[in-house]
Structures are given as C-alpha cells and as structure tokens.
Image (cartoon, helix red, strand yellow):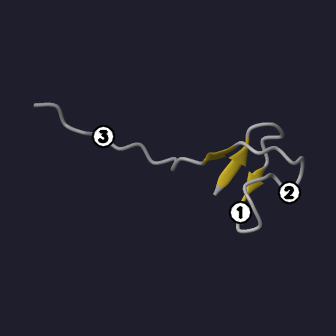
Amino acid sequence: MYICRNCHKEVEDISEGITCPYCGEKILIKKRPEVVKKVKAE
C-alpha cells in the first residue's frame, strides 16, 4: 500500500508504473503499519 505525496490518496497497485493514477505524481510513499513496536531497553 502506497500513499501519493501530492493528493494523499492510497494507491494499491503500482504494477502499471510508479505514478499515481489519480494525479500523475511520480513520488509515492510506502504506508507504514499502524502497530507500534515496543522494545525493552536494558
């Protein structure tokens, strides 16, 4: 899952090329998972 930097819409399939199908922006940001990992400090 990717997010367009320009129009902020979610893009699922980028097999057609690395452009947003809605606005044509070439920069897509990979969506990070919403789960936060906690690491215990020692």
* Residue that badge 2 annotates: 21
Instruction: Identify the residue at the far top of this view.
Output: 42
Q: What is the secondary structure assignment of the residue under circle 1?
A: loop
User: Disc 2 residue type?
Assistant: Pro
Helix, strand or loop under label 2: loop
* Lateral position of residue 25 relative to residue 40, left or right: right
Taking the spot 63% from the left edge, 58% from the top edge, the residue there is: 1
**Up/down of 20 relative to 29, above or below:** below
Q: Could you say where residue 29 lies in the image, as x and y percent from the top left?
A: 64, 44
- In this figure, which residue is indicated by the disc labeled 3? 38
Marks 1/3: CA–CA distance: 31 Å
Residue 13: percent from left, percent from top:
72, 66
Upstream in the sequence, badge 3 or badge 2? 2
Q: Are marks 3 and 2 in contact (CB under 8 Å)?
A: no
Please state the total of marks drawn on the protein image: 3
Q: Residue drawn at (30%, 40%), measured in percent from left and top?
A: 38
Q: Is residue 40 left or right of residue 30?
A: left
Label 3 and label 2: CA atoms lie apart by 36 Å
Element under label 3? loop
Query: Percent from the top left, x then y, of residue 14?
Result: 71, 63
Horizontal placement of 21 versus 28: left or right? right
